[in-house]
Image (cartoon, grey):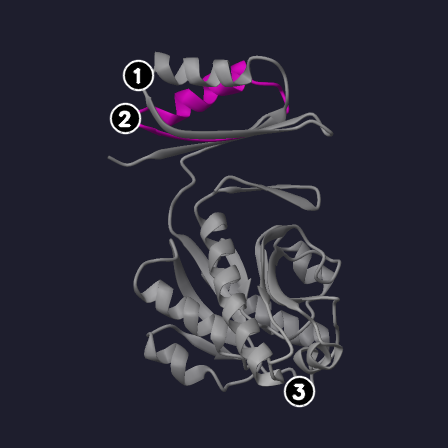
Amino acid sequence: MYNHILLIKCKDQKGLISKVTTLLFENNLNIVGMKEHVDEQNNEFYLRCEFTENANLILLKESLTRLLPEDATININPRKKKDIVIYATKEYHCLSDLLVRNYFGELNADIKCVIANHDVLKDIVEKFNIPFYFISYENKSKIEFEEELLNITNQYKPDYIVLAKFMRIISSEFVDKFENKIINIHHSFLPAFIGANPYRQAFERGVKLIGATAHFVTNNLDEGPIITQKTNNVDHSFSVEDMSKSGKEIERIVLAEALQYVFEDRVFVTGNKTVIFD
């Protein structure tokens, strides 16, 4: 039987869990999983509930609206395969991983197309019968480049845009069109290194931890709400190539995990943070 999903965000008050569970019981609905969180600092309540049995979801939402605080955001039954567009450049590791997961139905998403600012990944994308678009940024202004990007993206009306090592900085105007809908992956070093050849910099500094961060894109570069982070231990025996290989592997894992959380409707964005029910 298909599990319905209920997502609630509102101001916290006593009795919210009781109100929700009682209403579901009165409608003869069976709760098969529920998680909740209270952000005490901001007095905010978050809930994700899965339930079974047939239900009139419109009437159920109307009943919840009457029961919950006026500011409540209520979303019922959002779980469906998400339509996504992937942006890429030259690096294949994240993109190829997503293509394989998509092929075997592991993403809870449909990759509608891949857009890249280089054409080196065209062959691998087309092996999976997914449209590939090459948009060069040479001899174009940023505005012209993003207009082309936007025109193709909008044809597919994606639920999310995934930056699979897309090595171009997106303008604030572009980001504003897809608020909390663009997901990025980047390396994470302790200490941090920016600019060209980060693995060379990390090697020369003798770092002991490398990792990756997946986050929503905002107008503050690489500072959006974090979805997932992981690290790997490295040591003096690692060459630059070893560090790069380890970094790419963890980027694949972190991006796939982040997308799983997002596409299964387990992520709430609150300010510059996330609440994630795993």
Label 2 crowd (10 A; few <14 / some 14-19 / many >=20): few
* Distance of label 3 from label 2 (alpha carbons): 55 Å
The span from disc 2 to disc 1 (Cα, nearest Å) is 8 Å
Checking the image for residue 160, the label placed there is none
Q: Is residue 272 above or below residue 104?
A: above
> Which residue is at the front of the view, 137 or 118?
118
6 or 83: nearer the viewer = 6
Q: Position of residue 65 (x, y in %)?
A: 52, 20
**Residue positioned 36% across, 64% down in the render:** 101
In depth, the one of 224 and 39 nearer the eye is 39
Q: Amino acid at mark 1?
A: Asn
Dot 2 lies on which element?
Answer: loop
Q: Which residue is mark 3?
A: 138
Marks 3,1: beta carbons within 8 A: no
Q: Which residue is mark 2?
A: 53
- In the image, is residue 257 above or below residue 133? above
User: On screen, 26 above or below 123?
Assistant: above
149 lies above or below 264: below
